[in-house]
Amino acid sequence: MRRLLTLLCVLICSGWALPAGADGLPAPARRIVTLDWGVAETLVALGAPPAGVPDIRGYADWVADPPLPAGTVNLGSRFEPNLELIRSLKPDLIILIPFQSGLEPLLRRIAPTLTLSVHQGVGQPYAAAQEATRTLGRLTGREAEAEALITRTETILSDSRARFAVAPPPPVLVSAVADAHHLWVFGQGSLYGDLLGRLGLRNGWTEPVSDWGFSAVGADRLAEAGDSTFVTLRPLPPDYETGLTQSPLWQALPFVQAGRVTVLPPVLMFGMLPSSARFATLLADALVPR
């Protein structure tokens, strides 16, 4: 009981939302269900994979690494999960994010719930991800593994930053392609934007962004990025190659004419430390080959 009270105090004092349903939270939690892929990738990295995750195929497409264990139960949609399936897993804890807060009253009837906020309106998602990792380490009894993950990620970022210092690229414009005409471009307050700064790089996008750190724009707005290097990430929509990149507007963009277009493998845009390390490594490998 003393361990539980200490854990709850740490969670509350560190600023994480702890809804009323979490007062029966076991410590450590052995069977966790999460509706967020960023939490899921972190639990996998800590060696405490979740019992259930929604849209497992989507996780494979958008997160890719680390992969979920073969026995992970697919809970359906991230926003309309299968509540009966969740109940059947008998979870100790259900973890969600603020964007899914409408589900919390229903989930609280099944098991204690915890809401972690790493991205929405946070401003510095990388630092928030570090603290969330420590929280998950305490919840699962894997504090040492959490600190090791934090240290390992810092080392990877430091190594990538050193590579960029030797051969600094132009400002980097990071985007996700929505369709043949629209993109999400990541600026201040996004995980990608935060990581660019930590890697010693300039962000090519300085326009106003949403609470999630991105702007939803038409391809014509990319002309404002000037001499940037354009970076986008898979998965790409089917009409990326046949639509967007074939349009006269796209062909006229400065970074296209200069050949500064890079497509990276998947990295979760709203991920945590595993995604941060993966992004830093992939970006350095693409822009500063060894």
Image (tube, grey):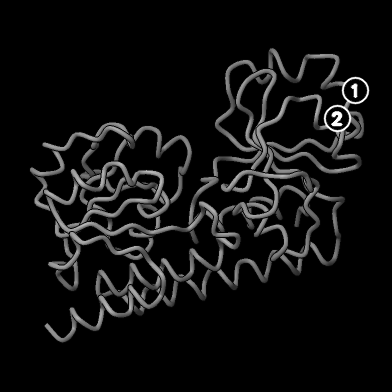
Residue 261, image x, y percentages: 78, 35
* 171 over 266 or under it: above or below: below
Q: What element carries label 2?
A: helix
Q: Which amino acid does label 2 sit on?
A: Val
Residue that label 1 marks: 252
* 129 over 208 or under it: above or below: below
Residue 163, image x, y percentages: 76, 64
Q: Is 83 displayed left or right of 132 in the figure?
A: left
Residue 96, image x, y percentages: 32, 51
Residue at left offset 69%, top offset 54%: 188
Near-viewer residue (159 or 11) = 11
Residue 212, image x, y percentages: 57, 47
2 or 1: mark nearer the eye:
1
Q: Is 137 displayed left or right of 286 in the figure?
A: left
Question: Which residue appears farthest toward the bottom when viewing the image?
Answer: 2
| Image-quadrant location for residue 103 | top left
Near-viewer residue (185 or 140) = 185
Residue that label 2 marks: 256
* Number of residues whose C-alpha sits closer than 10 Å to that of mark 2, classed few (under 14), some (14–19) or many (20 or more): some
Q: How many marks?
A: 2
Q: Are marks 2 and 1 in contact (CB under 8 Å)?
A: yes
Q: Is 18 displayed left or right of 178 in the figure?
A: left
